[in-house]
Image: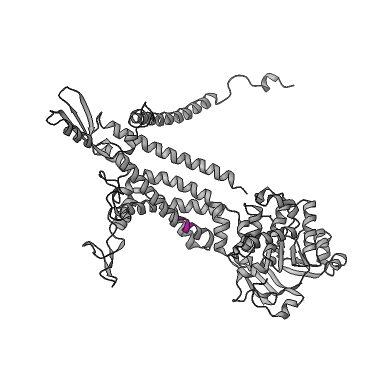
């Protein structure tokens, strides 16, 4: 007969303290990360919220979102009241008070007005890049998933595309600069001096000149599109492959051509996956600074990109401000002070909200489309 | 409606629908079919039976060239003649061939769209836009597939809401909507319950006046019930081919008898 006391062991099991220690250590690391994230967000929200929210209806500072970016003038008037005015209002003030004496005047670049210019620029860049990347990316994915035979060469192509995703964005920026800004061909009747190669087209004076698009919206879009192409291609190819082979077989067996099959039986059912991945790519495009630094973005611009154009297509060759680049400018190029914080933290908060909304939107879209399309 | 080519009238009236002559077929370097010769008669049901991997589905997919979709496969020898035309002739358009030789798959695979769109798909892909023609075709095909009464009130609902047996009959309906002459069926009842299976079998019996059926099946009783002729395959070769009644009562090859009686397979 075995003593039951021995069967049910009493006291601490072996390794009890070790177990508790590991649990505590892993837990504390996890919560440390959480605390860092919370501190980061708290700082941005606390300092940024006053810039874009207000206590009065409609609770959002419309001016910050819709006004152009200006230099901030800070000064005291004769009564000792402190004024903070963007350049345009400052000039109005001077006009309204001719001969007024101004004390302690200080100016802060980029800190006055709003950030409508950068928001508009980022929207245009994102839109253009997504359209380009979707067109080229989905085309390549259809070829790879539906037409290409599985050969070592195609395998190498796929690997190369995957590796493209790992290239640092600054390299894409420099690539875009050397290719889209300086080298791509344009048709023009006045080739630039630094054109690499001029091929006369023999129609009037027109020539194909390899002189690039200069720093412009379209160069920026093209660079950003290159950067997200691997993501779009890979995700689209996976979505295409996830469509059951039975749909293709059935369609082909009914006498549909291959392209009809792809258009009617494969693409519609892979759209949810393609759209979700492209929405995630949007958040990446909207947030990148390095690729647009040399190809499209300017720190200061008085007009919106669509203003002052002789022809609507000129918008493609105009430079733009962009939100991430604006944040970089505000952080790196101007001294930090109590007067610049509104612009700095406000911009970051607007940007964070934008990215959060896009991510959330992509999650919702995915859930909704998944529920609708089941087989 | 025959898209293949202008067919000599002689071959149209001939009793042979699909003529398979000395066909050998390879998956890469593996030979899957060895010198198969058999002819399928018009308006008959021909059953292909045999153990898994014997090549019966492969041969079936050869007849409408669905094997073209699989990389590394080719017919190494012989030819298949459908309605008097060699289907591997360079002048034959594979898309048109498949309109004449339809196929129903093992797993019912309706598109996740409405019942109406599923049946109208084949005609739409041919460029048919006339609503009246499409309506007519959908009605006739669903009626032919004995599905009309069950779905007439919900043509615009998703085909995925149908039961497994209804889905398979829908697949038959959309196959015959393009008016093929031959219908290939790859184990059409393997995923269905006995009642749904009986319905599909009844359907094949009633439709065989208008179409030629070739059916691959693992189910010996089904082959006995539904087919006029039976071909028994083993290891890529055609072992025996003949009248179903004779095959099941007195097979002339020992291997066939062993398989039919369930000794192996």
Return the residue nearer the eye: B70 or A346.
A346
Q: Which quadrant would the N terminus of chain A be assigned to in this image?
A: top right
Residue A140 belongs to magenta span: yes
The image quarter containing residue B17 is bottom right
Q: Position of residue A99 (x, y in %)?
A: 11, 30
The answer to whether any part of residue B231 appears in the image is no
Q: Position of residue A156 (x, y in %)?
A: 46, 59
The image quarter containing residue A135 is bottom left
Q: Position of residue A206 (x, y in %)?
A: 27, 68
Q: What residue is drawn where x is 78% and y is 68%? A: B44
Which region of the structure is painted magenta? A137-141
Q: What residue is drawn where x is 57% and y is 45%? A: A370
Q: Is residue A347 above or below residue B49?
A: above
The answer to whether any part of residue B71 appears in the image is yes
Residue A346 relative to residue B158: left or right: left
Return the residue nearer the eye: B252 or A221.
A221
Residue B19 relative to residue A265: left or right: right
**Most prominent secondary structure in the magenta stretch?**
helix
Q: What residue is drawn where x is 26% and y is 44%? A: A299
Q: Is residue A165 above or below residue A52?
A: below
């Amino acid at each position: 007969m075995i003593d039951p006391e021995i069967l049910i062991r009493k006291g601490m099991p072996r390794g009890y303290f070790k177990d508790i220690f590991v649990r505590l250590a892993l837990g504390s690391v996890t919560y440390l990360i959480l605390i860092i994230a919370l501190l980061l967000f708290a700082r941005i929200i606390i300092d940024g919220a006053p810039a874009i929210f207000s206590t009065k209806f409609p609770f959002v500072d419309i001016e910050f979102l819709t006004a152009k970016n200006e230099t901030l003038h800070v000064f005291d008037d004769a009564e000792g009241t402190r004024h903070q005015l963007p350049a345009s209002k400052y000039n109005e003030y001077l006009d309204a008070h001719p001969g007024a004496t101004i004390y302690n005047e200080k100016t802060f670049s980029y800190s006055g007005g709003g950030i409508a210019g950068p928001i508009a620029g980022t929207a245009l860049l994102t839109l253009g890049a997504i359209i380009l990347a979707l067109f080229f990316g989905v085309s390549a994915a259809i070829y790879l998933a539906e037409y290409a035979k599985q050969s070592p060469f195609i395998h190498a192509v796929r690997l190369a595309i995957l590796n493209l995703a790992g290239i640092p964005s600054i390299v894409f920026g420099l690539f875009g600069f050397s290719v889209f800004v300086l080298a791509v061909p344009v048709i023009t009747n006045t080739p630039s001096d630094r054109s690499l190669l001029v091929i006369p087209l023999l129609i009037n004076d027109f020539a194909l000149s390899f002189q690039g698009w200069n720093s412009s919206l379209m160069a920026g879009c093209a660079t950003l599109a290159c950067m997200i192409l691997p993501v779009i291609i890979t995700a689209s190819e996976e979505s295409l492959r996830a469509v059951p082979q039975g749909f293709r077989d059935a369609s082909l067996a009914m006498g549909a051509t291959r392209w009809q099959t792809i258009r009617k039986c494969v693409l519609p059912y892979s759209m949810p996956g393609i759209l979700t991945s492209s929405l995630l790519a949007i958040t990446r495009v909207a947030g990148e600074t390095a690729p647009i630094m040399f190809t499209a973005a300017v720190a200061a611009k008085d007009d919106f990109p669509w203003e002052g154009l002789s022809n609507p297509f000129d918008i493609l060759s105009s430079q733009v401000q962009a939100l991430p680049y604006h944040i970089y400018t505000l952080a790196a190029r101007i001294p930090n002070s109590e007067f610049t914080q509104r612009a700095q933290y406000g911009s970051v908060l607007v940007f964070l909200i934008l990215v959060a909304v896009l991510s959330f939107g992509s999650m919702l879209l995915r859930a909704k489309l998944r529920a609708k399309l089941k087989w | 409606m025959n898209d293949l080519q202008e067919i000599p009238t002689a071959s149209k009236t001939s009793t042979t629908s699909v003529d398979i002559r000395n066909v050998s077929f390879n998956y890469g370097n593996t030979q899957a079919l060895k010198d198969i010769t058999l002819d399928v008669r018009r308006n008959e049901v021909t059953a292909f039976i045999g153990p898994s991997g014997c090549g019966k589905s492969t041969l079936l997919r050869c007849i409408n060239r669905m094997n073209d979709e699989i990389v590394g496969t080719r017919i190494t020898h012989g030819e298949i003649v459908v309605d008097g035309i060699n289907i591997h002739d360079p002048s034959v358009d594979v898309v048109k061939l498949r309109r004449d030789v339809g196929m129903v798959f093992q797993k019912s695979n309706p598109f996740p769209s409405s019942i109406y769109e599923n049946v109208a798909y084949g005609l739409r892909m041919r460029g048919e836009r006339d609503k009246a023609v499409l309506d007519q075709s959908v009605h006739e095909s669903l009626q032919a597939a004995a599905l009309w009464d069950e779905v007439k009130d919900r043509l615009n609902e998703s085909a995925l809401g149908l039961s497994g047996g209804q889905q398979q009959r829908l697949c038959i309906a959309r196959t015959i909507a393009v008016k093929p002459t031959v219908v290939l069926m790859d184990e059409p009842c393997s995923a269905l319950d006995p009642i749904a299976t009986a319905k599909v079998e009844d359907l094949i019996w009633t439709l065989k006046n208008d179409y030629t059926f070739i059916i691959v099946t693992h189910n010996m009783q089904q082959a006995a019930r539904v087919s006029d002729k039976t071909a028994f395959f083993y290891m890529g070769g055609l072992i025996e081919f003949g009248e179903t009644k004779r095959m099941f009562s007195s097979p002339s090859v020992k291997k066939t008898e062993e398989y039919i009686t369930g000794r192996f397979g």
